Amino acid sequence: MVETRVSQHLVPPEPPPEASQPGALVWLRKNLFYSRGSTILTVLVGAVILLFLRGAVGFLLDQGRQWEVIPRNSANYSIGSYPRENIARTWVSLGVVAFIAGLATAAWRPIGRVSPGQISAAVRSAGIAALVLAVLAPSTFGGRTEFLIAGAVLFVIGQAALMALGDRAIDAFLPTLVVLGAGLVAFLVVLWILPISSSTQIPWTIVIAAAVVAFGVGRALIQPLGAPTVKRSVVALALFALPVLYLHVQRAPEIPWDRVVDWSAWIIPIVVIGYAAVIFVSGAEREAAAIVNGLLVVASIVVWFVSAPMAARFLLLMLTAVSLATPTFGSGEKGRRTVIAVWTGVVLVLMYLFAIGVGTPTLETNNNYFAGINLTFMLAIVPMLLAFPLGILMALGRTSTMPLFRLMSTGYIEVIRGVPLITVLFFFRFGVLNFLPPGLQPDAILLAIIGITLFAAAYLAENIRGGLQSIPKGQYEAAKAMGMTTAQMTMLITLPQALRAVIPAIVGQIITLFKDTSLVSIIGLAEFLRVANNIVPGQPDSLGTKLENLVFAAVVYWVFTFTFSRASLRLERRLGVGVR
Amino acid sequence: MTTERVTAPQTKPPLWRNETFLKWSAQIGVFVGIVALFWVLGTQAATNLDAQGREFSFRFLSDPAPQISEGIFTLPENGLESFATGIVNMLRVTFSGIIAASFLGVIVGVSRLSSNWLLSKSATVFVEIIRNIPLLVLIIFFALLCSLFFPELSNEASGPVWLIFTRNGVSLPWLFPTDTFWQWGAFLALGVVAAVLMFRRRDRLREQTGQNTHAPRYAMGAFLVVAAVGWFAHPIAGALGWIWQLLESIVSTVPVLAWQLLFAAVAVFLAVRWIRGFLDSLRSPAGLAKLTDDDYFRIGLAGVIGVGAALVFLFIPAITETIADVTAFVFGFFDQKFEFLRTGSPMRFARPEIIKPANFASIGPQGMTMTPAFFGLWVGVTLFTAANIGEIVRGGVLAVPKGQTEAGLAMGLRRSQLLRLIVLPQALRIILPPIGNQYLNLAKNTSLGIAVAFPEVVATMTTLANQSGQYLPVLLMWMGFYLTVSLLLSSLVNYYNRKLKLVER
Amino acid sequence: MTSNGKKEPIIVCDGVKKWFGDFQALRGVSTEVGEGEVVVIIGPSGSGKSTWIRCINRLEVHQEGRIIVDGIELSSDVRNIEKIRSEVGMVFQQFNLFPHLTVLQNVTLAQTWVRKRTKAEAEKKALDLLERVGIREQAAKFPGQLSGGQQQRVALARSLAMDPRIMLFDEPTSALDPEMIKEVLDSMKELARSGMTMMVVTHEMGFAREVADRVVFFDQGQIIEEGTPEHFFTDPQHDRTKLFLSQIL
């Protein structure tokens, strides 16, 4: 017989037993010397590491090393041979970027907290490491005194901070935003106090002020406009600022009004036809809209085979795209107003970009407006943005049920992924010119951008394909069952989910692309690595400093890449605990 | 029960509203558009080259080629030898890099999982440093270090030695193929066939008797026996030269028109075969299923592509001519390598030496010589791949279910035994595909050798392209080469993958 | 004869056949469904009943025979397909809510893009419907934060928001925990009482008995027997039907 038992009262939850703080000796015992084997291993590894560090420090800080070439060439590293009398233009660009960054920080409040205890402990450890190295370093070591002083200072600061925090060292946290602000202030203080670079004190202050002001503006705007609107505006602003900064501010082109007037014979009819077409299509029956769109597609292909200005060809292409999207996204009274606004915006932006794009730069230089880390960032950002639509198209093609689309996308993706980037870059740098009409000879940077774009698109397509395949079949069925067209289903249901699922993979792709930009140094573009490897060591006063410059380049690449990848890890975690 | 009443007569929808028609017309439209784009670019290129008085050709392969700093032909007679040198150099870095990166990567991965704090932290620091620096920077940096740290070459000649290790290069004793190597190679190919046959036979025997028949050992033995016999009997294989000669003369004497007709017929035949296979796949026991509009489009497309290819072969003789020329060239090449009763040892052992033809000493042509650029590239790609492999190994080990470890511990296994006997074999299945990918990446990354003047495929062919201006043919050769390497490596990885999966069941 | 001869047929199936490769899933299905009729389809799993109702809004393409919904023939005519789909709502076994959108956005999305309603109209309609299925207070949440029963009721509201004339239910309660089934069935009963034409694939015999105008027994890709619930459950004619009922009741 089983006796029936009824619980008389519910047990309330209890706090967990308090964990005791292990002492340093216990920690060492547990992690380094827990068995005879581990003790031997620890001693061996420790010895190897100490020897390696000692050698490396001795080698890198040998008395013969000329580290002063790095600060002397800081301008070369950032902007290459950009004319120095126009350097204000690059500062303006940086200021605009800082402004947008400030707005973005206000829109996407960085979450997370930083433990001051951990920072202090890290500072103290760095101090100890510097002291140990200064003592152990070989006799060729050139910076023993400096290391001793720096190590002692760091140690004292870290220890003092820890003692000041006391018990709160473990569980006190600062918002990331505060730490960020403090970092910027510290940077400015150091810049004004230490004699590093007096010519950049004022510009840097203005740039940082721009970021701070933008942060305030952003915070003020969120209340009346709502966070989603602000976020969307910041993205739009950033996308528009990119070509303006690169093509207009940094190149200072003379707008060729005579050519613009020449274009107008083509442009004005296209603009007028465009308004007529989108207004008609947004209100028309499906068949009538399809006929108009079909005619536009044919026209936008034909215009490439007759002698028309490039601006007209692209404008017609954009018109076709807008008109093709109209039945899906812009029908009805409200839709009509939207497509009219979109078409107006497309015309204005495209014409402006063409006008400044073909304009001759007025700066006196050997055509190298973009160089140094400026070019490196350009070669990472612009191709990534251009590769996105292409990659999405390829991914859709590869997952499509239509065999010819699948075949073409798969062929493209697999061929590109099968060859190294450098072969693509070589072909675009030298070979492609054979295939273009004699009047159309794009410069090396544009060719490199096209090559990297086509390369990155294939890898991006594979990432996005992974996302598309992870979407359950039911999502497609539910969308179809509600009468959505394939275009609506893709844009509203499947693509948003697929992209969200592969954000970590895409960020990884961006990081890879950032590192891969170093390859264009092989085809002779003066990006960051080429400045470090060829340009600076080639100067008469810096001969024989290749090692110093390479180490510096490695450190800079490392700092950027490491920061990106840490940020992406955080993003991944944030997405993981979020909506899904 | 139900009425059979249907309210309206059935009608076919008009063409512009037919889903199947719309889908196919969109596909064919885009396809034709892309073909047209390439056609426009192609005609433009032809116009441009005409204006410059040039044309696309692979002639640079037979034209003289410049000197190469290291490899099998340091003074190549023609572009083809230059290409071959690049390939061999690339394969040298790739294979030695794969082996070294695998060892180092496994060590790094296991170290990261170690419970020894110092070891796991050092491995983490290694991975984080290497993975976040561009590979190109690593390669240039290590090449620079090699040229700084390797000792200088003393300015005196010396006789054959076992090792030369200097800034000018590292030279090792080596076995080199001689004139008769290809004749022996025919025997090696025969040996592979013999090994496969032997393996199958022993394997069948194992299935019949259930006993271990040591199939791999027997197969190896068969290969070695044939190879050993071939070492002495290879002059007989020289008779193959007559066959190559015959083939070459056939290819070059048969008129191009005949080849054109043959190729066109093959294109049509393949299309017909595909259509028949497609129809067969639709045939069910109940008879041929009803063909949908979609199926008609597919069949039509296959037919159009087949006939189109046939027409291209018939009306553009240049394509067929090129194929025939290349085939004849290959047969001619083999013909030179075989000569009936040509004797001599197929391989030659040589030790390196330092020569001093004039005022300056240099490493002689004997021995296998590698420049510091080789080591820069090799160290760079090895460390980079090892860091990635380390992460894959770590992920793979962590992905083995915890229950497996617990079961092992419950059986009383020690940690090392647990890792070796339980965890690693299971992790292997998870980590093999991504590691295969890393090998592929390593092979492609060797192309960065050009930055440190290491003469691999991209570097040697870039030189030829710059000389001749033939960038498109060179790009096609690169694509052909790298796609072949990708295909070979990935089929190898897939083969092992399948094998591991079979064992699992 | 349909169960109610006065009603106009809104769905007509005539000899509908469908193959998956060699396997014939539908072997000639012919029946009519009148306006406002509630048809419950039962049968063993793998009998093709889901395939059949998925053919009615062309989630599966039938190869032979004809399907006419509301006077529109289902063929490869793109215009008819979309028209029918917006007239026919469907609720799935696995809910298939869009996880990246809130409950409210799930219900308004197709209204704004397919029915071209303004955002305000769509939201008003959505909130009314959510009220009707009893989960208005969850409108701002994401589907992942709701229970299965709540999700299925959102899916119901999402379909109803399109003002369909016909509703298809593909085993709507099969993926739910037992205590959630009732809340979904209650919503469906309420819908049936309001005069909606419904085709329901389900294993809930209680629901069939209470709500159905007609019960269809489906096996091996064909209709074995159909009739009123009283007739069907008390006096089945076909041996296969008897066997099936004896196994589940």
Image (cartoon, coloured by chain):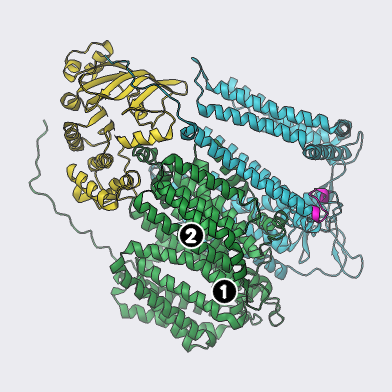
Chain colours: A green, B cyan, C yellow
Residue drawn at (25%, 46%), measured in percent from left and top?
C146
- Where in the figure is residue C210, as x and y percent of width and height? 15, 26
Mark 2 surroundings: few (<14), some (14-19) or many (≥20) residues within 10 A: some
Q: How many marks?
A: 2
Q: Earlier in the sequence, mark 1 or mark 2?
A: 1
Give the residue at mark 2.
A346
Identify the amino acid type marked 2: Val
Q: Secondary structure at mark 2?
A: helix
Q: Secondary structure at mark 1?
A: loop
Residue drawn at (53%, 35%), measured in percent from left and top?
B24
The image shows residue A191, relative to residue A259, as above or below, that is below
- Where in the figure is residue A14, as x and y percent of width and height? 18, 57
Position of the N terminus of chain B by quadrant = top left
Identify the amino acid type marked 1: Gln
Give the residue at mark 1.
A250
Chain at numbered mark 2 = A
The image shows residue A187, relative to residue B302, as above or below, that is below
Look at the image and tell me whether residue C68 can be seen. Answer: yes
Foreground of the two, A99 or B35: B35
Q: Which residues are magenta?
A: B50-61
- Where in the figure is residue B474, as x and y percent of width and height? 74, 51
Instruction: Tell whether B38 sits left or right of B175.
Output: left
Quadrant in which residue A363 is drawn: bottom right
The image shows residue B462, relative to residue A287, as above or below, that is below
Chain at numbered mark 1 = A
Circles 1 and 2: CB atoms closer than 8 Å: no
Foreground of the two, C229 or B502: C229
- Where in the figure is residue B421, as x and y percent of width and height? 49, 42
Foreground of the two, A432 or C22: A432
The answer to if A458 sits in the magenta stretch is: no
